[in-house]
Every structure is written in C-alpha cells, then in structure tokens.
Image: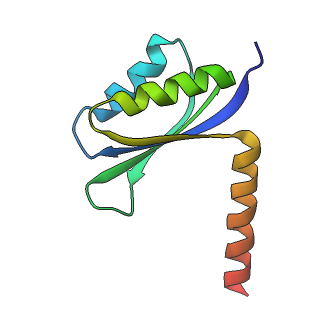
C-alpha cells in the first residue's frame, strides 16, 4: 500500500456530537488521526474540522465521500502533503509581504 499524508477539511453545522460522528468514521476504518483541529469558520454557525492522516489515495476518496454523507456535514475536501506545503508557502509569503 502506498500511504501518503493528507489533510481533510470538513465544514459542518455547529451541532453537538459532530466531533464523535466525524471521528468514528476514522475509527471504523482503523485510521489514526495524527492531528485534529476544530474551529469556527468565517460563516456563523459553521465549524471547520482540519484532520491530518496517513492513508492511500483510494481510501481518502472513500473517507471524504462518507464524511459528506453525514447529515450535518456541508462539504469535505482533502489535500495531499504537496498541496499543504504549497498552501503554507503562499500564506507565509502573503504574511511576509503584509508586514513589510
């Protein structure tokens, strides 16, 4: 199996029990969550989950689709490690240019 590092962004309605419902998807597939961050999104009443895992490309596609089937999940996206590095580089560049 060719496992890679992926970051999943999940936008949900801010409802009690969403953390358990999201994490159980990974538990059932025996996938370890390396990092998990939940925060408010720019839209009131919407939460954003940021989840980092190691898995295969085919598995990440299935997980993302399963997340989107959850009732209170609005949208789920995944990014590979190379996409994450590019995003971090762009944010760093923007931040550096804003300071100067």
The vertical placement of 95 against 65, above or below, is below
Which picture quadrant has residue 96? bottom right
Task: Give whichever of 72, 35 is nearer the camera.
Answer: 72
Q: Position of residue 9 (x, y in %)?
A: 50, 43
- Quadrant where the C terminus sits is bottom right
Task: Give whichever of 77, 31 is nearer the camera.
Answer: 77
- Quadrant where the N terminus sits is top right
The vertical placement of 96 against 52, above or below, is below
Which picture quadrant has residue 53? top right
Residue at 28 percent across and 61 percent down: it is 44
Residue at 51 percent across and 12 percent down: it is 29
The vertical placement of 14 against 17, above or below, is below
Residue at 30 percent across and 34 percent down: it is 18
Q: Position of residue 59 (x, y in %)?
A: 60, 20
Q: Position of residue 74 (x, y in %)?
A: 35, 43
Judged left or right of residue 21, residue 76 is: right
Task: Give whichever of 38, 72 is nearer the camera.
Answer: 72
**Residue located farthest toward the bottom when viewing the structure as drawn:** 100
Tally of numbered tags: 0
Residue 55 visible, this angle: no
The type of colouring in the image is rainbow
Judged left or right of residue 26, residue 73 is: left
The vertical placement of 69 against 40, above or below, is above
Residue at 50 percent across and 30 percent down: it is 64
Residue 34 visible, this angle: yes
**Residue located farthest toward the left when viewing the structure as drawn:** 16
Q: Position of residue 60 (x, y in %)?
A: 59, 26
Judged left or right of residue 80, residue 9 is: left
Which picture quadrant has residue 80? top right
């Amino acid at each position: 199996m060719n496992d890679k590092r992926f970051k999943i962004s999940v936008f949900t309605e801010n409802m009690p029990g969403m953390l358990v419902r999201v994490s159980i998807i990974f538990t059932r597939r025996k996938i370890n969550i390396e990092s998990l961050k939940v925060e408010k999104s720019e839209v009131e009443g919407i939460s954003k989950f940021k989840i980092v895992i190691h898995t295969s490309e085919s598995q990440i596609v299935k997980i993302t689709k399963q997340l989107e089937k959850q009732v209170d999940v609005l949208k789920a996206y995944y990014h590979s490690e190379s996409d994450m590095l590019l995003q971090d580089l762009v944010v760093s560049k923007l931040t550096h240019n804003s300071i100067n």
